[in-house]
Image (spheres, grey):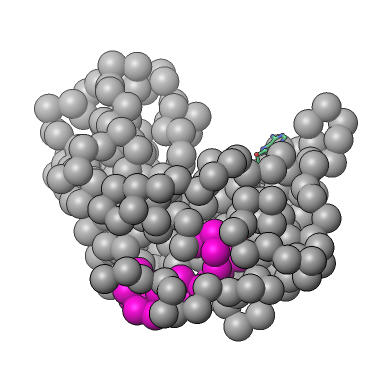
Amino acid sequence: MRGGRHVAAVTDASFDLAAGECLALVGESGCGKSVLASALLGLLPGNAETAGSAVVDGIDVLAADERTLARTVRGRRIGLVPQSPAAHLTPVRTVRAQLEETLRALTGTRRKELAAATEAAAARAAFPPGHLDAYLHELSGGLAQRAATAMALIGDAPLLLADEPTTGLDRDLVDRTVDELRRHADDGRALLMITHDLAAAERIADRVAVMYAGRIVELADATGLFGRPGPRHPYTRGLLDALPERDFTPVPGLPPALDALPAGCAFAPRCPRTTDACGTAPFLTAGLACHHPVTPVETRHA
Ligand SMILES: Nc1ncnc2c1ncn2[C@@H]1O[C@H](COP(=O)(O)OP(=O)(O)OP(=O)(O)O)[C@@H](O)[C@H]1O
Ligand code: NI
């Protein structure tokens, strides 16, 4: 896309997400997480191309036209907590006005119940009622984030995409937000949570998809990945080892530019386990795309 060049921002992403389940999508900045979410909502720029299918609640959202997306998908089948609230909330109306409008459109709340319903919607995302009459530019980043989360929860959509919903929040608000999002799944709906925050992913997710350079490289149950047997992909292991409560050792080097991917495994240049075999790209098979997975014994220290 950039400068007339073709960028494969997401390649061969394939996963299922059941009602009642939370999948966390993790990976370094720029690996394609938000592009994946935008594709599901038909919100990619006009010059972007998608291939394949993504069936959500009976509709192939990649094949759907703009009218269908606007009328039956966005907000109704798929809710979005956007990564940048500023881009999705309007600057010219108060938070209250925007919550009211969404409540009327998605839940048919009647006028005399609107005030109470608005406060209840705000409370779900820990948005303080005293700020309901503020405009976006009057809010801190964390408050704008909570306003966007409140908006996204209103439709109780069968699939909620939460793209970095905890940015700008301090730890106890992170936990509150994560627990409210978890409730969305526990009520029998699906949640795709995009995050850098592995602690938040561990708290909320049933399964974890790890993305590297536009591809899902590991897809595993959260308990196995964070506990035993531990991660199998060397990149996932690197991410976990970078956590302050573990080794605090960052993965060396930087991810490749997506328009200049190496041939073969994109992680090979940063990987401690690289061999000649890595010149051929590994496919995701049984939840793993790696020629030299980490063995469980090596994985955990204590
Ligand atoms: N409009 C665009 N034009 C050109 N390239 C784009 C565009 N949007 C995304 N990309 C490319 O897609 C890649 C993935 O971007 P994306 O926003 O999905 O990353 P991310 O994993 O969500 O990162 P972050 O954690 O920083 O939000 C970017 O590195 C960029 O190369
Ligand atoms: Ni993103």
Reply yes or no: does residue 125 show up in magenta. Answer: no
Reply yes or no: does residue 233 show up in magenta. Answer: yes
Q: Is residue 256 above or below residue 295?
A: above
- Residue placed at 15% from the left, 34% from the top? 128
Q: Quadrant of the N terminus?
A: top right
Left or right for 141, reference 216: left
Left or right for 132, reference 156: left
Task: Tell me residue 99's x, y (percent).
Answer: 31, 39
Left or right for 45, reference 150: right
- Residue placed at 43% from the left, 74% from the top? 298
Task: Tell me residue 217's x, y (percent).
Answer: 61, 65
Is residue 117 at all visible to an observer of this figure?
A: no
- Residue placed at 14% from the left, 33% from the top? 129
Residue situated in front as seen by the camera: 276 or 25: 276
Is residue 28 at all visible to an observer of this figure?
A: yes
Residue situated in front as seen by the camera: 276 or 148: 276
- Residue placed at 24% from the left, 46% from the top? 174
**Residue range highlighted in magenta:** 216-236
